[in-house]
Image: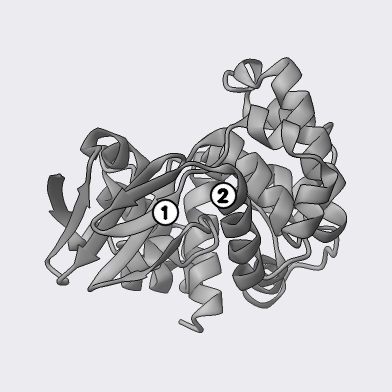
């Protein structure tokens, strides 16, 4: 068992996990049981220090982006002079963007389209239970996220039986394409080009592509737009557009390299009615 802690002001587990960027977590003891790829950790906070316990501290130090100074990011958010953004950055200063596995994010956000979070979590859990490897951490059993070859070999019926609905063929087709081509050539692409490439995969539209770019490839200049961000755009920025791609581009032009951070603060702030 390995353990490390971090200043809770800039690492709040609840704010970090409960903002739509991750689906494999649940309440556990005094905090949360978090899964990523084939790793598990227990993260909890007393309001002063946030503690991460795992068997791979190096993985989770990077996963929670703890090498990055979020005090500077918070300060940058407040400079934009947007009341909702400033309030959210102040109240949710412990919200962090995660560095997640790209392939896991591709499949997870294909599942997420036109879906709600409890159902997304349930589908992913069933896929992991059916194809992943059984492991144990802190006396709790869990299943790893399946490899692409296992997903590709599963067949459309498996995904349908997991409750994926019309997304079953998307997962089957995309996993087989990734098995054949890999995704190594996607990592060095700039965000705009990465999005174009992601849009060529079955089941990936504009919002899903932006989510994958931000949460799977750590493209911090990406800005996914969902119902909450549409509301932010109209209510807090006085925007008139209805096309989500144009709204996303508006925010990217405004926030630049900090777009992803602004997106998370605005999403959490609007949903929490800050």
SS at mark 2 in the image: helix
Give the crowd class for mark 1: few <14, some 14-19, many >=20 residues within 10 Å. Answer: many
How many numbered discs? Answer: 2
Who's the residue at 55% across and 76% down the image? 270
Give the crowd class for mark 2: few <14, some 14-19, many >=20 residues within 10 Å. Answer: many
Instruction: Out of 144 and 117, give the one closest to the viewer.
Output: 144
Q: Which mark is residue 63?
A: none
Cβ atoms at labels 1 and 2 below 8 Å apart: yes
The answer to whether 20 is drawn above or below residue 254 in the figure is: below
Query: Which quadrant of the rendered structure holds the C terminus?
Result: bottom left
Q: Is residue 145 left or right of residue 51?
A: right
SS at mark 1 in the image: strand
Mark 2 sits on what residue? 128
Residue 253 seen in the current view: no
Kindly report the distance in space between the C-alpha atoms of the residues bearing marks 1 and 2: 9 Å
* Residue 113 locus on image (x, y percent): 75, 58
Q: Is residue 74 left or right of residue 125?
A: left
Residue 240 seen in the current view: yes
In the rendered structure, which disc, 1 or 2, sits on the residue that comes first in sequence? 2
* Residue 170 locus on image (x, y percent): 83, 43
Would you identify the image quadrant in which residue 222 lies? top right
* Residue 243 locus on image (x, y percent): 85, 58
Q: Which mark is residue 142?
A: 1
Display coloring: one colour
Who's the residue at 56% across and 53% down the image? 129
Query: Which quadrant of the rendered structure holds the N terminus?
Result: top left
* Residue 10 locus on image (x, y percent): 25, 58
The answer to whether 57 is drawn above or below residue 247 in the figure is: above
Would you identify the image quadrant in which residue 219 lies? top right
């Amino acid at each position: 068992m390995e353990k490390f802690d971090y200043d809770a002001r800039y690492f709040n587990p609840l704010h970090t996990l409960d903002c739509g960027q991750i689906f494999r977590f649940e309440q556990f003891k005094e905090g949360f049981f978090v899964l990523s790829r084939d790793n598990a950790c227990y993260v909890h906070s007393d309001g002063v220090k946030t503690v991460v316990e795992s068997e791979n501290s190096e993985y989770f130090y990077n996963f929670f982006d703890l090498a990055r100074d979020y005090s500077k990011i918070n300060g940058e958010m407040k400079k934009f002079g947007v009341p909702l953004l400033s309030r959210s950055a102040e109240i949710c200063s412990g919200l962090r963007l995660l560095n997640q596995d790209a392939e896991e994010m591709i499949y997870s956000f294909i599942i997420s389209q036109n879906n709600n979070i409890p159902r997304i979590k349930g589908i992913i859990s069933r896929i992991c239970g059916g194809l992943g490897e059984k492991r144990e951490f802190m006396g709790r059993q869990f299943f790893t996220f399946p490899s692409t070859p296992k997903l590709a070999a599963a067949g459309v019926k498996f995904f349908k039986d997991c409750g994926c609905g019309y997304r079953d063929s998307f997962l089957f087709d995309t996993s087989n394409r990734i098995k054949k081509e890999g995704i190594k050539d996607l990592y060095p692409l700039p965000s705009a080009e990465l999005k174009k490439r992601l849009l060529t995969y079955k089941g990936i539209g504009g919002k899903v592509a932006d989510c994958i770019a931000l949460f799977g490839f750590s493209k911090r200049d990406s800005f996914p737009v969902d119902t909450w961000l549409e509301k932010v755009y109209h209510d807090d920025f006085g925007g008139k557009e209805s096309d989500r791609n144009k709204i996303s581009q508006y925010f990217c032009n405004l926030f630049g390299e900090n777009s992803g951070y602004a997106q998370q603060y605005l999403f959490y702030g609007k949903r929490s009615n800050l």
